[in-house]
Amino acid sequence: MNEQSNITQVGTIECAIRRFAETGLVPPDVVPRPISRAILEDGPRKIVLLDGARGTYAFKHNPAAAKSGEFAKEAKRLARLGGYLQATPAFGVVEVVWVDPEGEAMATRFDPSPTARDALATAQTEEARREVFARGGRWLSALHRATEKKTDRINLDWIGEHVARLRHHKSTAVRPHAAPDLLDRMTAVILVDAAALKGVEVPSVQGHGDFHGGNLLFAQDRTIALDCTSGRRSNPLFDIADYLIDLDLRCNPEEDDIGASGIDEDHLLAFLDGFGPTSPREILDRVIRITMFLKFCKITLLAFAGDPVVRRRFLAQQNRLTHVLLPGENVTGSKPFSPIRPSRMRSPNAP
């Protein structure tokens, strides 16, 4: 097999890197380095760092993406979001430098800046913690304000059927929930929330789609978003809920600090200070509760039994949801606001 055949062979990350090296951005013999914040190290999906003369690149590889067109779609979404944010240079998205013609890989310019999760984990004061929430609000506001074109109406009639499928699924891949009785009691309350929101008018905006603290970089003079693969026009409140839930569950607030949303009120208000005007608080509180509940629903018995990180996340979500949906119950007998990882004092922790 000649050298050109080796380069065009598909299915391995080594061959995909060699195709990227043809651009001249990295040498043909580049040695991949691990990336500490990577979350794609599962099975065939990989993300590594590649060093070149003009910088370092984050290199994503997934052989299954050739069929789905995953990386071409992500590059288009990032370009679209970057275009929306051109008028606000303090906010941006990661720069795509190459999309594999074979469809298996993508390279973006690597920025070593801390993620929002990192910033929260190292914050030493309440003021610094609040700034993490406010800064996320400012980035999201820039995107939403630039793309708000029309309105939509909330309809969450699908929730009851969705929970029932998760609750009673019998396949080996999707086992029933780890706490089915508790899930049933929570569902009854959530359906009241969903009914109260039906028909409520909200803006229709371009969303990030996976807006959590690991997908936002705090560079010195810019805030940069990553992984916009799920971005689409949608209800803006769900992006808000995703960011608040991801970061606030890593903290250890006192009981009196938790509002009706299930989020520390100081953190929620800090986010809104950055984001600006949005829907009335009662509507936002309901959306946050529903979003946290749906994340809780996805934790199957199989995942709960097999992954200690999932068990910690389960406990954090269970305790918050029990507090706001089923007041008076303490199903675990533990502090109602345990973080994803135990913390000292009220200091948040990295994932």
Image (spheres, rainbow, N blue to C red):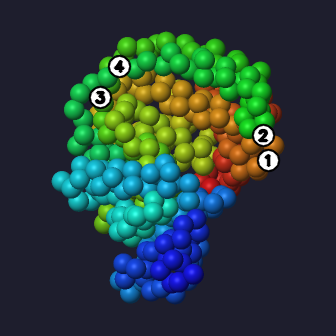
> Would you name the residue on which mark 4 appears?
153
Identify the residue at horizontal 46%, vertical 13% (top origin).
Answer: 196
Quarter of the image where one finds residue 47: bottom right
Task: Give how far apart the Cα atoms at labels 3 and 1 are.
Answer: 40 Å
Q: What is the number of the mark on residue 302?
A: 2
For mark 2, does the 10 Å Cα neighbourhood hold few (<14), some (14 to 19), or many (20 or more) residues? some
* Image height of 125 relative to 18, above or below: above
| Mark 2 or 4, nearer chain start | 4
| Mark 3 or 4, nearer chain start | 4
Q: Name the one closer to the observer, 218 or 11.
A: 11
| Mark 4 or 1, nearer chain start | 4
Quarter of the image where one finds residue 128: bottom left
Residue 318 drawn at (x, y percent)? 69, 33
Residue 315 drawn at (x, y percent)? 72, 39
| Mark 3 or 2, nearer chain start | 3
Q: Name the one closer to the observer, 280 or 240.
A: 240
What amino acid is at disc 2? Leu
Q: What is the number of the mark on residue 306?
A: 1
> Would you name the residue on which mark 3 appears?
203
Identify the residue at horizontal 35%, vertical 45% (top origin).
Answer: 140
Q: Nearer the viewer, mark 3 or mark 1?
A: 1
Q: Secondary structure at mark 2?
A: helix
* Quadrant (top left, top right, bottom left, bottom right) of the C terminus: bottom right
Q: Secondary structure at mark 4?
A: strand
Q: Nearer the viewer, mark 2 or mark 4?
A: 2
Contact, CB < 8 Å: mark 1 with mark 2? yes
Identify the residue at horizontal 60%, vertical 49% (top origin).
Answer: 250
